[in-house]
Image (cartoon, rainbow, N blue to C red):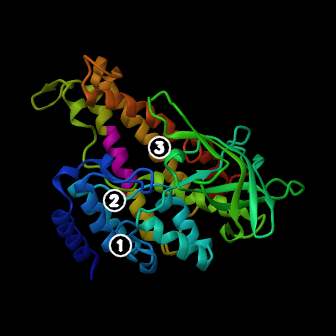
Amino acid sequence: MSQQSFAEEAYRWLDSHCPPSLRGRQDAVTGGGRKDPLEDPDGRRYFDAMYERGWTVPEWPREYGGAALGPDEHHALRTAMARIGAPAPLRGMGTSMIGPTLLEHGSDDQKSRHLPRIASGEIRWCQGYSEPGAGSDLASLKTRAEDRGDHFVINGSKIWTSGAQLADWIFCLVRTDFEAPKHDGISFLLFSMDQPGVTVRPIRLISGISPFCECFFDDVRAEKADLVGGLNRGWTIAKRLLQHERSSLSGTTPQTRAVPAVAREYVGLSEGRIADPALRRQLIDHEMDARAFLLTHKRAREENTEGGTQTFATSMFKLYRSELTKRRTELIVSMMGTRGIGWEGEPFTPDESFETRFWLNRKAGTIAGGSSEVQRNIIAKRVLGLPD
């Protein structure tokens, strides 16, 4: 089937299987897991249909619940979803981070045990990387894993652990050799969050939500079978996973509109166009930047001869996308004037309050997955080859 034929078939199928109540609603998706079941009947039917087709993880092999789509087909599917307003049926660290990493570095046993449960939405994952004393200098982490024969015993803590309160499992960086140079004594472990010794405390943010948590591990068990990449080789796995994370954060799905309707309501019009020439220029500049970003993604995809494998160039896309999105939310709030500073209650509408909170939330996007400063360093060293 040609790419064009696939795109047309995907569009027709989505048009018939995505309920109108879900279209344009990214909040309708599920992160999976046992602690946050998908209760909306329309959402459940849509998810089940997408899962049966392999489209919860379209590029994964069929044996693990995917549809084995190539990069071009996957892009065509995402474009068709954007045209209809169909939300991604499943999101989270399972599909975007640990899943792709296990496909590359996991054992056959690890793949067969974990990947199908990600694709089906049965298990939700979180990431145990940052610690109170190890953020950008992640290799300074102190969480310890002691070898007890057939398993490890873990003690320590993690912070800024996104979605830990809803996660069933965690992929975690631990120190297994305190005598080795700091990058060489780290291992990559998988273990259940639902066991004695795991304590999770959500952190409330300025945006009013608590997506991040503190996690404490006191004599927590991880099986030897869930050591990924070998003992003391976790740093290599950790860096590879971050490339997948940054790729997922770079956002290649086309946007159907530059600004939401709630912001356009407050813009003065003259003869069918925005009256303020400065604001008009800002909107045009943003739209041109967004389209150039998508075209650059397209070119990179067409030039990629490694079958979609992520490279250090993902830092470039992650940096630009997070900064572009931050500028977009700032533009929206400025367009709304005093209506763009609402928090909750009267006289602000729910849509107005949402835009204010989303504006604050997107500032964190320039930190999540590696700050913009970290991405610039990676681009300078790994992409441009500049000296330290």
Front label number (2 vs 3): 2
In this view, the residue in front, 226 or 199, is 199
Q: Is residue 87 left or right of residue 17?
A: right
Residue 4 location in percent, x, y? 24, 74
* Residue at position x 46%, y 71% in the image: 116
> In terms of secondary structure, where does tag 3 sit?
helix
How many numbered marks are there? Answer: 3
Residue 109: in magenta span: no
Between the residue at mark 1 and the residue at mark 3, the CA separation in whole angstroms equals 29 Å
User: Given the image, on which type of amino acid does mark 2 rest?
Assistant: Pro
Counting residues from the start of the chain, the first of labels 1 and 3 encountered is 1
Residue 32 location in percent, x, y? 42, 57
Between the residue at mark 2 and the residue at mark 3, the CA separation in whole angstroms equals 23 Å
Q: Residues within 10 Å of mark 1 (few under 14, many from 20)?
A: many
Q: Which residue is farthest right? A: 179
User: Given the image, on which type of amino acid does mark 1 rest?
Assistant: Gly
Q: Residues within 10 Å of mark 2 (few under 14, many from 20)?
A: many
In this view, the residue in front, 280 or 72, is 72
Residue 293: in magenta span: yes
Q: Is residue 386 left or right of residue 13?
A: right
Counting residues from the start of the chain, the first of labels 2 and 3 encountered is 2
Q: Above or below — where is 53 with respect to 263?
A: below
User: Given the image, on which type of amino acid does mark 3 rest?
Assistant: Ser
For the residues labelled 1 and 2, say whether their Cβ atoms are less than 8 Å apart.
no
Q: Is residue 144 left or right of residue 193?
A: right
Q: Which residue is farthest bottom? A: 1
Residue, disc 3: 322
Between the residue at mark 1 and the residue at mark 2, the CA separation in whole angstroms equals 11 Å
Span highlighted in magenta in the image: 285-294
Counting residues from the start of the chain, the first of labels 1 and 2 encountered is 1
